[in-house]
Image (cartoon, rainbow, N blue to C red):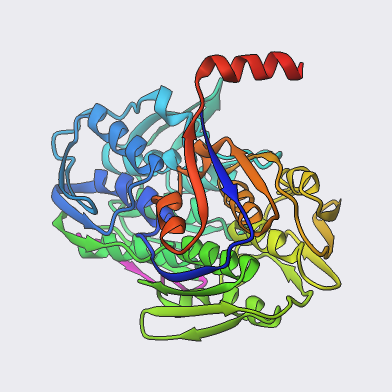
């Protein structure tokens, strides 16, 4: 077991370089399955989700060559199987993109239901299935497996999504690349990584228009050929460091960002009294005075991202007055609140709302990362707290953040990653029980 040990109370100063977008990478890597030839993907983040997806592709028969730390050549021309590795599939949420990619390429797919973060509620794929069926596929979800087939081939269709699901938007888009005719998807997600996936596919020869708007049109093509594509910077990683300096204080220059993608986060931090100065591809964030209370409602882009909800909630624990967070995407995403309570936070959850009464300080404690972004929030809490915080469950965090510990240490954080022997962990469990 690995855990992070953080000695808080130190402001952050210096420069942080943002990695490629995790949410774009985990969709574009499966999208490479549609390419007949070598595609070079640049700015790939070195995270465990990427490693697992690359392993799935390798087991399917793809050739993956590491060019450098952030660049890979992927050649899926030798893949012959439409059955993905079940064991790895169940450990990562984004593995469901292989349904659309395999269905689009082979006219069939057999994959396990995806895993990933658990927010305490069911994360359905009904909108994905709805789109596949509209395009002529037969889909069966049973016993943890998804079986999809289109014996007569996929065809264009008009599809209206009941919710602006990122996953469904991308998955249907992948399946539609080779479908006969035109596929029109309405009420689609507009997140930057949706636009990035469309950009990758178009760079390889697809005909996709409207990404970033409410309607995407895909005209089926015969073939995608190889090429090169660089991923966008990670909006949520950048937002996490912005939240960290907002909570801990100090001044950070955050480089390799697209400031326009950060508007929804920047606006809320400025309401709280945080100074944000934008450059062409960098943002300077600083905070020295007290934090003000605000209200936040998460929603689909360009709204405030649900993936930043735990981080902003943690910072608001130290703001003057009462703040209210409303979760507008998931039924619940507040499992991490009990961890904040251990540190002295004053938070009450009522359905989709969290009412946060600011406190003077947080106190270090032993806490757990319940999912990826909640784990990042625990790290931020540790940076802000008085005393020492130990964060367990950091494998969740490492699914989506590149060298979080190393980057924070370079800007003044007192944080270490420590391996705990298995026997110690077992003894601790027995002692607690």
Q: Is residue 207 magenta?
A: yes
Q: Residue at x 43, y 30 (%)?
A: 89
The image shows residue 24 at horizontal and vertical percentages of 39, 56
Foreground residue among 415 and 218: 415
Q: Nearer the viewer, residue 326 or 3?
A: 3
Measured from the top left, where is residue 369 in percent x and y? 62, 41
Figure check: 243 above or below 414: below
Main SS of the magenta part reads loop
The quarter of the rendered structure image containing the C terminus is: top right
Q: Is residue 92 visible?
A: yes
Q: Residue 168 at x, y = what percent?
A: 50, 51
Which quadrant holds residue 120? top right
Residue 391, above or below 423? below
Q: In this image, 24 relative to 120: left or right?
A: left
* Residue range highlighted in magenta: 204-214
From what the image shows, is residue 85 above or below residue 120?
Answer: above
Task: Tell how many labels.
Answer: 0
Q: Is residue 345 magenta?
A: no
Q: Quadrant of residue 361?
A: bottom right
Give left or right: position of 36 versus 331: left
Apparent side of residue 96 relative to residue 64 in the rendered image (left or right): right
Is 79 rendered above or below residue 221? above
Q: Residue at x 64, y 14 (%)?
A: 427
Q: Position of residue 330 (x, y in %)?
A: 69, 51
Image point 30% across, 47% down: which residue? 29
> Is residue 401 something that shows in the picture?
no
Closest to the observer, 314 or 64? 314
**296 or 171, which lies in front?**
296
């Amino acid at each position: 077991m690995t855990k992070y040990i953080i000695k808080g109370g130190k402001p952050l100063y210096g420069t942080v370089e943002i990695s490629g977008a995790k949410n774009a990478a985990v969709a574009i890597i499966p999208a490479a399955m549609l390419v007949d030839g070598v595609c070079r993907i640049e700015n790939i983040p070195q995270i465990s989700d990427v490693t697992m997806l690359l392993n799935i592709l390798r087991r399917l028969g793809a050739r993956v060559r590491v060019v450098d730390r952030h660049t890979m050549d992927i050649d899926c021309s030798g893949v012959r199987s439409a059955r993905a590795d079940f064991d790895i599939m169940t450990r990562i949420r984004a593995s469901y993109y292989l349904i659309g990619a395999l269905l689009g390429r082979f006219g069939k797919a057999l994959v396990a239901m995806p895993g990933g973060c658990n927010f305490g509620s069911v994360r359905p794929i009904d909108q994905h299935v709805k789109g596949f069926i509209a395009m002529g596929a037969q889909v069966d979800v049973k016993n943890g497996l998804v079986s999809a087939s289109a014996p007569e081939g996929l065809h264009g269709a008009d599809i209206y999504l009941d919710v602006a699901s990122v996953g469904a938007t991308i998955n249907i888009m992948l399946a539609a690349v080779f479908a006969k005719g035109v596929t029109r998807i309405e009420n689609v997600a507009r997140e930057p990584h949706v636009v990035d996936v469309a950009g990758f596919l178009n760079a390889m020869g697809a005909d996709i228009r409207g990404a970033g708007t409410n309607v995407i049109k895909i005209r089926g093509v015969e073939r995608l050929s190889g090429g090169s594509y660089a991923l966008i910077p990670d909006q949520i990683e950048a937002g996490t460091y912005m939240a960290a300096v907002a909570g801990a204080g100090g001044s950070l220059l955050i480089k390799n960002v697209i400031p326009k993608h950060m508007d929804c986060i920047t606006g809320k931090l400025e309401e709280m009294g945080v100074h944000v100065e934008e450059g062409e591809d960098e943002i300077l964030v600083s905070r020295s005075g007290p934090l003000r209370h605000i209200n936040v409602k998460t929603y689909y882009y360009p709204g405030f991202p649900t993936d930043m909800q735990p981080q902003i909630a943690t910072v608001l624990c130290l703001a003057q007055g009462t703040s209210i967070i409303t979760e507008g995407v998931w039924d619940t995403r507040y499992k991490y609140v009990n961890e904040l309570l251990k540190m002295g936070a004053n938070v009450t959850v009522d359905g989709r709302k969290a009412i946060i009464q600011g406190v003077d300080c947080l106190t270090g404690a032993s806490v757990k990362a319940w999912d990826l972004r909640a784990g990042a929030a625990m790290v931020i809490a540790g940076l802000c707290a008085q005393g020492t915080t130990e964060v367990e469950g950091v494998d969740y965090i490492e699914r989506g953040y590149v060298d979080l510990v190393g980057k924070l240490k370079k800007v003044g954080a007192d944080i270490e990653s420590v391996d705990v022997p298995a026997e110690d962990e077992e003894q601790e469990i027995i002692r607690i029980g």
